[in-house]
Image (cartoon, rainbow, N blue to C red):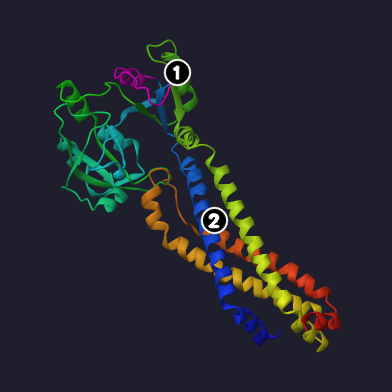
């Protein structure tokens, strides 16, 4: 294969080559991010614990349950423990600093999540401080918080009636070993919230958002679900009980058909870039009609000439693909800090990178086939006449 001719052709139109490489780079970068989001959503469901159930109002996730339900759920056969969860919805400084906060029962919460460990601080420190809270590693990194720092939050759902801020002291920083649990959340003692309301210092609803129910070893989840739902089917507040996987899927469904949307966007991007590269290669082949005629006259076969055009297309696309996956991997951490609360399983994995470069290779081969077939059908005399 005439390598010098291949290199001359590649760099004969540097601006066109750069723009084509750039378009493939952007396409592969976007496809890697979209695939990571889609796979992350699937991972959050796939890695959900089979030992945790979630009890919520049958009306809506936004309707609170009575506080008295905890003891009855606890007494259900097959239930080992019950943790109260209440969405807090506070604001740190302004709404652009949004992050999730939940009031929970500290020890019960920690016992229910063996996937979570403290990288700084401890459960004891958390329990000893009335205003103590724990935060995820990514949340700590986002705001530069460390153990001992004080975090003021503006109450929205639970406003302090004197107009002051809520005050929380960071007692620990947690690390999650599961893709189903994000590291961008704050947890604080449910009793701090309840006592503040009992002292008439705080407004807001008086119930419990959801109950996390930890199953006893060897308990049958379906039996427990049926028992809890039957207990409350006639009120005072009917409940819906789901596995953690189904609970995670419920949040994904609230966002709409995200996987379908992501696949549609990715397909559209790939489709557009394919025709952009194909057009570039057809233009390049048309400009080299005379060169192709000379090569054929010198005895070069159709296979070698076609192969040269395919290799040229492949080099352009794989270069763009390589840059795209490099940028995607470099952006993984910054993007994780933004999307991890919604997509805790977000990761630019080796599988995603392999798929990205494979798409670039496939794109290069497909875009090179059309000009290769055109060159194959050219007769030397006709090629020289057309290229004159």
Q: Are marks 1 and 2 in contact (CB under 8 Å)?
A: no
Question: Looking at the rendered structure, which numbered label has been put on residue 381?
Answer: none
Pointer 2 residue: 31
Which residue appears farthest toward the bottom when viewing the image? 298
Q: Which quadrant of the figure contains the N terminus?
A: bottom right
At x 48% / y 20%, what residue is drawn?
226
- Percent across and percent down for residue 263 are 58, 48
Prevailing secondary structure class for the magenta stretch in the rendered image: loop
- Percent across and percent down for residue 20 are 58, 68
Say whether disc 1 or disc 2 marks the residue closer to the N-terminus: 2
In terms of depth relative to the viewer, which is nearer, 307 or 26? Answer: 26
Decide if residue 213 is in sight here: yes
At x 35% / y 26%, what residue is drawn?
211
Query: What's drawn in magenta, residue-wise?
Result: 58-76
- Looking at the image, is 285 positioned above or below residue 257? below
At x 22% / y 36%, what residue is drawn?
154
- Looking at the image, is 71 positioned above or below residue 336? above
**Viewed as shown, does residue 207 lie left or right of 58?**
left
* Label 1: element kind: helix
How packed is label 2: few (under 14 Cα within 10 Å), some, or many (20 or more)? many
- Percent across and percent down for residue 106 are 25, 35
Pointer 1 residue: 229
At x 25% / y 24%, what residue is drawn?
204
In terms of depth relative to the viewer, which is nearer, 350 or 87? Answer: 87
Q: Which quadrant of the figure contains the C terminus?
A: bottom right
Which residue appears farthest toward the top when viewing the image? 234
* Pair 1/2: label in front: 2
Question: In the image, is residue 75 part of the stretch drawn in magenta?
Answer: yes
**Viewed as shown, does residue 175 lie left or right of 320?**
left
Question: In the image, is residue 257 part of the stretch drawn in magenta?
Answer: no
- Looking at the image, is 259 positioned above or below residue 332? above
């Amino acid at each position: 294969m005439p390598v010098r001719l291949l290199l001359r052709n590649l760099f004969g139109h540097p601006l066109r080559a750069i723009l084509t490489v750039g378009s493939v780079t952007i396409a592969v970068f976007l496809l890697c991010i979209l695939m990571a989001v889609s796979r992350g959503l699937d991972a959050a469901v796939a890695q959900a614990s089979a030992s945790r159930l979630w009890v919520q109002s049958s009306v809506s996730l936004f309707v609170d349950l009575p506080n008295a339900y905890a003891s009855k759920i606890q007494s259900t056969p097959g239930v080992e423990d019950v943790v109260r969860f209440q969405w807090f919805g506070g604001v740190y400084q302004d709404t652009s600093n949004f992050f999730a906060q939940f009031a929970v029962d500290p020890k019960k919460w920690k016992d229910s999540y063996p996937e979570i460990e403290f990288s700084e601080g401890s459960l004891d420190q958390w329990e000893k401080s009335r205003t103590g809270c724990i935060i995820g590693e990514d949340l700590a990194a986002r705001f530069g918080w460390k153990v001992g720092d004080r975090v003021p939050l503006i109450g929205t759902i639970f406003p302090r009636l004197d107009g002051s801020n809520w005050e929380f002291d960071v007692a620990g920083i947690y690390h999650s070993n599961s893709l189903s649990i994000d590291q961008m959340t704050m947890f604080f003692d449910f009793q701090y919230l309840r006592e503040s309301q009992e002292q008439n210092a705080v407004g807001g609803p008086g119930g419990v958002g959801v109950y996390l129910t930890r199953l006893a070893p060897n308990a049958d989840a379906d039996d427990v679900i049926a028992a809890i739902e039957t207990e409350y089917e006639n009120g005072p507040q009917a409940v819906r009980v789901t596995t953690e996987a189904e609970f995670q899927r419920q949040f994904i469904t609230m966002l709409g058909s995200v996987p379908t949307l992501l696949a549609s966007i990715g397909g559209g991007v790939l489709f557009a870039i394919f025709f952009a590269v194909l057009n570039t290669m057809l233009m390049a082949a048309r400009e080299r009609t005379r060169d192709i005629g000379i090569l054929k006259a010198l005895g070069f076969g159709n296979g070698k000439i076609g192969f040269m055009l395919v290799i040229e297309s492949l080099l352009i696309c794989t270069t763009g693909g390589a840059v795209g996956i490099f940028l995607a991997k470099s952006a993984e951490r910054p993007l994780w800090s933004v999307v991890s609360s919604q997509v805790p399983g977000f990761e630019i994995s080796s599988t995603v990178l392999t798929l990205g470069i494979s798409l670039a290779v496939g794109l290069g081969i497909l875009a090179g086939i059309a000009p290769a077939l055109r060159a194959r059908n050219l007769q030397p005399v006709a090629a020289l006449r057309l290229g004159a």
